[in-house]
Image: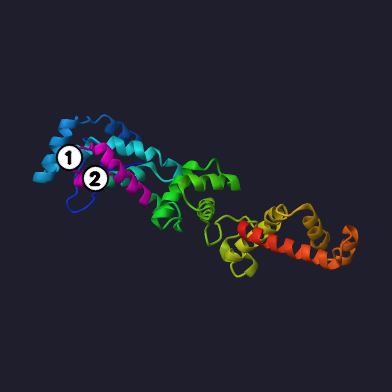
Amino acid sequence: MATTSTQLIPAADSNALVLGFSGSLGNIDAYISAVNRLPMLTHDEEVSLATRLQQENDLNAAQQLVMSHLRLVVSIARGYLGYGLPHADLIQEGNIGLMKAVKRFDPNQGVRLVSYAMHWIKAEMHEYILKNWRLVKVATTKAQRKLFFNLRSHKEGLDAMSPKQIDALAKTLDVKREEVIEMEMRLSGRDIALDAPTDDDDEKFAPIAYLKTEAEEPSRVLETRQFDRLQSEGLESALSKLDARSRHIVESRWLKNDDGSGATLHELADEYGVSAERIRQIESAALKKMKSAIASFA
């Protein structure tokens, strides 16, 4: 993405700094090379410049503080390249955060500007990523934003997380497992065009072609997937909670044949040498326990 240095350092407000380099920087690599050659400030120089800015509103001092920390923005921006957004845009947003930090920096607090500015730079980059990574926002609350960035850094690969991984991550981030599951679903989704693609492939069709079909309506598709998951993983999990006799009775009664024509109470009563009423009681207790297990699984 070709850009000049002045494009990478936009104005933050009406009192914005006018920064630039001598000559024209034709691309992002040239810009990065240039900022890495800028001199760094000593602690005494930093305090002196920050004091001038704070007491005299000296914009030249502010410019020197910003210029000496542009390499920090570049370094932080590299950590966010995995979101598929332009490196130059990430740096540009980070530079806005850097200028905000310089404007608010208090040299009397005993903290170096590099430590203070880091939080402002990341905040601007986070805001940019959340606004531009998807057409539909994936995180709106502060807690969701924190989970969004932590989940990407903790998740291994692109495969769906196992229940064990979800539990471990929820414990690590101190959030509910349901919140981890929801955010993972948001991250694993992708934006698709509403209209049909421009090529002539007859096998491809866009959402506009099937949104009128109730079976393909997004919420119905999600419901169907959830139902299928409950019928497989959820049912197996619920059955595993039962003792051997209760499981055998339930499977014999309801899961042997697809048409529901399972064993009768009397047939199972003869098998176990008890009354049909006793079999009904065991079945009722087992189904109640399974219902509770499935609800917990869901």
Mark 2 vs mark 1, CA separation in Å: 12 Å
Q: Please, what secondary structure does the residue beneath circle 1 have?
A: helix
Q: Please, what secondary structure does the residue beneath circle 2 have?
A: helix
> Dot 2: within a 10 Å radius of its alpha carbon, few (fewer than 14), some, or many (20 or more) residues?
many
User: In this view of the protein, which residue sits in the foreground, 226 or 128?
Assistant: 226
Q: Does residue 27 appear in the picture of this structure?
A: no
Nearer mark to the viewer, of 2 and 1: 1
The stretch of residues the image draws in magenta is 98-127
**Left or right of 120: which side holds 264?**
right
User: In this view of the protein, which residue sits in the foreground, 222 or 70?
Assistant: 222
Mark number displayed over residue 199: none
Which residue is the extreme one toward the left?
A: 56
Q: Residue at x 48, y 44 (%)?
A: 172
Q: Does residue 90 appear in the picture of this structure?
A: yes
Image coordinates of residue 121 in percent, x first then y, are 31, 44
Q: Quadrant of residue 209?
A: bottom right
**Left or right of 248: which side holds 289?**
left
Image coordinates of residue 220 in percent, x first then y, are 61, 66
Image coordinates of residue 68 in percent, x first then y, are 23, 35
Give the answer, above or below, for where 99 lies relative to 248.
Answer: above
Label located before the other in sequence (2 or 1): 2
Q: Quadrant of the C terminus?
A: bottom right
Mark number displayed over residue 107: 1
Image coordinates of residue 128 in percent, x first then y, are 36, 51
Q: Amino acid at mark 1?
A: Pro
